[in-house]
Image (cartoon, helix red, strand yellow):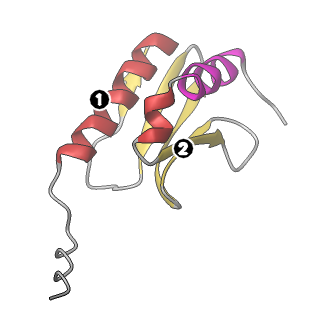
Amino acid sequence: MKWSTLDRELLQQLADIPEVTLSGFSIREGLNGTGVTVLKGHDYFGSWRQVATQLVWEPADLTVPGNLVESVDEAVRYTLLLILRNLEMPSRKPPRALAG
C-alpha cells in the first residue's frame, strides 16, 4: 500500500461521520492501494486521489465534471455535498405497489 498523508486523513475524516454510512454510502481505501473510494451501497460512486498537494474527485458518472480541491476539509465538504445532492434526487425505481 502506498498511502499518502492526504489519503489517510480524508479516509479517516469521512469514516468518522456516521451520517455517511447512515445514508447508504461507505468509504473505502482505493482499489489500487491509494486514494479513497466512495460507494453507494455496493455501487461505485466516485473516488479521490492525490495529485501533488491537491485532491482530485473522479465521479463514477463520467458525464459529470470532476473537482480539484486544495485541502482535506474541502474534499470532505464536497463529498458530503455530493451525498446530499444524491439523496435529494428522486429515485429512478418506481415505488412498489402496496399489497391490498
What residue range appears in magenta?
5-16
The structure residue drawn at horizontal position 44% and vertical position 21%, both measured from the top left corner, is: 76
Q: Is residue 57 above or below residue 39?
A: above
* Residue 1, image x, y percentages: 85, 36
Q: Is residue 59 visible?
A: yes
Q: Which residue is mark 1?
A: 81
The amino acid pointed to by label 1 is: Leu
Q: Which residue is mark 2?
A: 26
Q: Nearer the viewer, residue 94 or 30?
A: 94
The structure residue drawn at horizontal position 46% and vertical position 11%, both measured from the top left corner, is: 73
Q: How many marks?
A: 2
The structure residue drawn at horizontal position 22% and vertical position 73%, both measured from the top left corner, is: 93
Q: Is residue 71 visible?
A: no
Q: CA distance from mark 1 to mark 2?
A: 15 Å
Classify residue 48 as left or right of residue 80. Answer: right
The structure residue drawn at horizontal position 43% and vertical position 31%, both measured from the top left corner, is: 19
Label 2: state its secondary structure. Answer: strand
* Residue 21, image x, y percentages: 50, 40
The amino acid pointed to by label 2 is: Ser
Classify residue 50 as left or right of residue 99. Answer: right
Please, what is the dominant secondary structure of the magenta stretch?
A: helix
Does 9 lie within the magenta span? Answer: yes
Classify residue 77 as left or right of residue 85. Answer: right
Label 1: state its secondary structure. Answer: helix
